[in-house]
Image: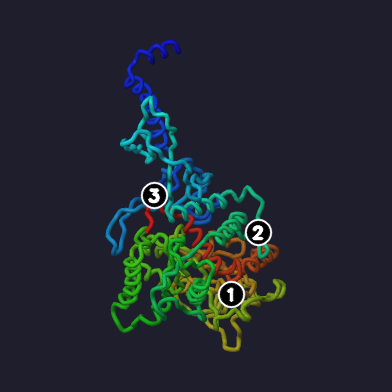
Amino acid sequence: MERWVCIWWKKSSSSTRLLGLMVPLIAASLLVVFGSSGSSGGLFSSNYHPLVWSSIAGGQPVLENSNNGGSDSVEKPMDGVEPWDLQRRVGDVGETEEAYSHDYVPNQSVTPPLAVEEIESTAQEQSLEKGKSSKTSTNGSAVLPFSNETDTRPLNLRIIRKFSNLERLEAKLQQARTAIRDAHMRNQSQDQDYVPAGPMYWSTKAFHRSYLEMEKHFKVFVYEEGEHPIFHNGPCGSIYSTEGGFIYRLEISKFRTRDPERAHIFFLPFSVASIVHFIYDRGTTDYWRPMKLTVSDYIHLLAGKYPYWNRSLGVDHFMLACHDWGPELSKSVPELFKNSVRALCNANTSEGFDPSKDVSIPEINLPGGRMNGLIGGPSPSRRRILVFYAGGVHGPIRPILLEHWENKDEDVQIHRYLPKSVSYLQMMRKSKYCVCPSGYEVASPRMVEALYTGCVPVIIKDHYIAPFSDILNWKSFAVEIPVEEIPNLKKILAGISTRQYIRMQRRGIQVRRHFEFNSPPKRYDVFHMILHSIWLRRLNVRLHGVKDS
């Protein structure tokens, strides 16, 4: 064979020899090009389907549409869930097609295929023949012309891949996803403030690692447009305290960035409670219109001034509302309702709350804006009342509760209103269990009040997603009773053993740190838990095919 090649080389012309060299090289190049184009390891172009917390952590499914089964294919959607597809931008900057996808394949271990730092070789490109231009392969890499037999200059190929700011952000998020997913295989990190432990958490290691990754990476851009009292403002001394307390704390938080190019998510700083207080006109027939125009005009202003809303259709934006009308006002802009993260106290799935992208936050009543005198209560052995409730009669559930139990049993203290001489909080401190029923809407401050006073919450609500239920296993420290079981309320609670009751009560005391407002905020308190739930939703979404602004 070698002898034949030598004879052919001596007898052939120079052009024939060159052709003989080019044919195998071209064939090899085509194999590389078409072989790599079929791979699905790219970070920014694969199609993913919606997921919930368990698909990042690889742990227990906790939300209604979670899937804890493994999968080797990113192309196949979950049963009953359509993958996100190409969408049209909205706003004033024109219509283009842009893609975003919900992440992440459940229980699939993925090593980030993309380094965070920019990859650039130090070699210099040199043309092998003067006047000949280089060609480009189908995958974008440079293919230089071949030299003739007299050209002896070395072949130095320079391949440059510059990553945009958004791609760098997504690459860091990918590293965070991998760290969270691998947390169950490692020892739990030490933490001087608090180490999550116990059955109150779906996955202690995953939650702890996710929280640490949030502290390390997460950045929020707060739009500065808008004036008081509607924007950058909110109530801090009422049952809507979560709304104002979060807005004020975020604006001075270390998580805030003034550079939108560094932001993972964008906050829309309007207060629904303030909109209702200052704009709602009870005397008009179409009282929704001016309130909804306030929201839609604000978003259209931002969409015309900045590129960030348009590039993702609002997927990387979030609003926060504790007023009951928050879900309705989020419909002011279809993309806000459908795409954006909505942090809501009124987390009602029958009204469009989607636990895979929305966040349930606690309704907290802070008289005077402070927690003074709200925390603490006697030990379980000093609580003589089995169950307690007092409150107004509104909504479909409370009349049923009062009909069956008002003034019917000494152990079941169910009242419409308490006498002025009787303290509401003191009655909770004397009780083992505290009923937390829905009113007109599902949100109520009673769940947090029960945790504050050491009373085990009894949740009677339909279509409700409890706060932080992507992290917390509410059944370990609260009792959930269906509406149809209200006639059996005493039987159910009396049937819980003393040992189990004490366990639930102690677990409630342990997790109440996650529902406390502190000034300044403390790690793992309600401000940080709200941020963490938003961080999880951002991890669940991946932007791709989007150019820098």
Q: Residue at x 36, y 26 (%)?
A: 148
Residue 24, given in percent of the width and then of the height, sits at 39, 24
Q: State whether residue 339 appears in this view.
A: yes
CA distance separating discs 1 and 2: 27 Å
Res 65 seen here: no
Q: Is residue 25 left or right of residue 374?
A: left
| Residue 408: % across, % down | 57, 77
At a point 62% along the width and 64% down the height, the residue shown is 477
> Residue 412 is drawn in which quadrant?
bottom right
Residue type beneath disc 2: Gly
Q: CA distance from mark 2 to mark 3?
A: 35 Å
The residue furthest bottom is: 421
- Left or right: 103 with respect to 372? left
Which amino acid does the dot numbered 1 rest on? Pro
Q: Quadrant of the N terminus?
A: top left
Q: Residues within 10 Å of mark 2 (few under 14, many from 20)?
A: few
Q: Which residue is mark 3?
A: 83
Q: Residue at x 40, y 38 (%)?
A: 126
Q: Earlier in the sequence, mark 1 or mark 2?
A: 2
Give the secondary structure at mark 1.
loop
The vertical placement of 267 against 2, above or below, is below
Mark in the foreground, 1 or 2: 1
The label on residue 198 is 2
* Residue ID for mark 1: 520
128 vs 234: above or below? above
Instruction: Give the SS element for disc 2.
Output: loop
**How far apart are the two marked residues, 1 and 3, measured between alpha carbons?**
41 Å
